[in-house]
Image (cartoon, rainbow, N blue to C red):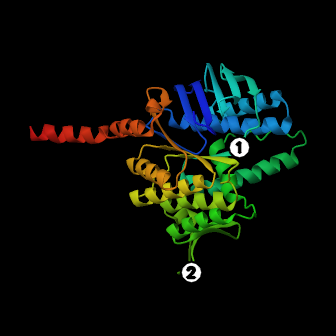
Amino acid sequence: MEKGSIVLTLENIGMLKKAQVDIGGLSVIAGENDEGKSTVGKALMALIKAENTFVEKTSPKHAKQSFNRLIDLLFDNQMTEKGYLNLEVNRDEFYKVTIVENECISFDRGFSSRFSDCTFVPSPLIWDLYNFFSSVAVLEVENRFYQSNQNEFDFKYPYILWDLYRKISIERPCLIRGSIQEIKEYVQEIMSGFFIKKQGKYVFYKPESDFQVSIMNTATGIKSFGILQMLIQNDYMTENSFTIFDEPENHLHATWQVKFAEILARLVQNHVCIMVNTHSPYMLEALHKYGKKYAINTNFYLADSGKVEQIDNDNSATLEKIYKKLNQSFISLDEILDEEEE
């Protein structure tokens, strides 16, 4: 563990037996499908959001209640029979959460976390659900306003998508510092346009041709960059935030995967902490090279057989093993060709 590191440790969470990830910069978890990559991000999201409830309410009871609510929302009450999460800073400061039979039984606080919020980005298709979530928001407000008993809004909705919807849709006027503003402009340059709200709805607008298109008809790849634009614009990509991108390569051409990786590296250079889950060799290679170019704290991890780990505490050794795992599909294709030739 390096000086200044922020290390998240999980044991027996979801399908993971053990995971240890330095989240103090750019952390990249790679592996095949169904190896628990997303579990790390969801567990971290639960911890950060519950921790901020702790700070606001100043009571461990409230933190446990909040974490249990997040176990329901993020894990559908199937987090673990017995496990724990530990967040360690510079070796000695930490949070430790213990879960037994899918219930948080202890939330021990050792320091005040630097993270004020956590955003999980699972898919650019959140834009296609924009109208749906807008309707849910109206129903939620009406429920709170008209029902005298103030019952909790009991409509079951995907919390991760709801959280992301709110962050990209509710405009927060703010002053974005110069270097982050430059990154936003670079995002818009790649898209050759930008997302803008008109008459209460977002459209994708191309200023050069004075052309606009509805969200539903915007290319999925552009929607991925549109999420970046709105998170930056609404001040959710800051040094006090944490953002998780779950397989961002989906729906992106290889060229745009490389561009996306560059943007993430530049954000980390500006002290934004980011986690990426991926199984794309293009994304991996781009994150590796841009991590070096921008001299950022970058760590790669392999998700395999119930563990998320770094091989011998070495990025090169870890990447070698990751590429070997991901290249199995090409080996299988070669075997098919060999069988045909026989």
Where's residue 36, x and y in %?
Answer: 50, 32
For image coordinates 82% across by 27% down, the residue present is 61
Q: CA distance from mark 2 to mark 1?
A: 40 Å
**As drawn, 234 above or below 244:** below
Position of the N terminus by quadrant: top right
How dense is the environment of label 2, judged by Cα within 10 Å: few (below 14), some, or many (20 and up)? few
Residue neighbourhood size for the residue with mark 1, other residues' Cα within 10 Å, grouped as few (<14), some (14–19), many (≥20): some
Q: Give, as a three-letter code, the residue at label 2.
A: Asp
Identify the residue at image location x=17%, y=42%: 337
User: Which residue is found at the position 36% from the left and 38% from the top?
Assistant: 320
Q: Residue furthest bottom?
A: 209
Which residue is outermost to the front?
3
The one nearer the camera, 210 or 106, is: 106
Q: Which residue is mark 2?
A: 210
Residue behind mark 1: 115
Quadrant containing the C terminus is top left
Left or right: residue 282 versus residue 151 is: left
> In the picture, residue 152 is in which quadrant?
top right
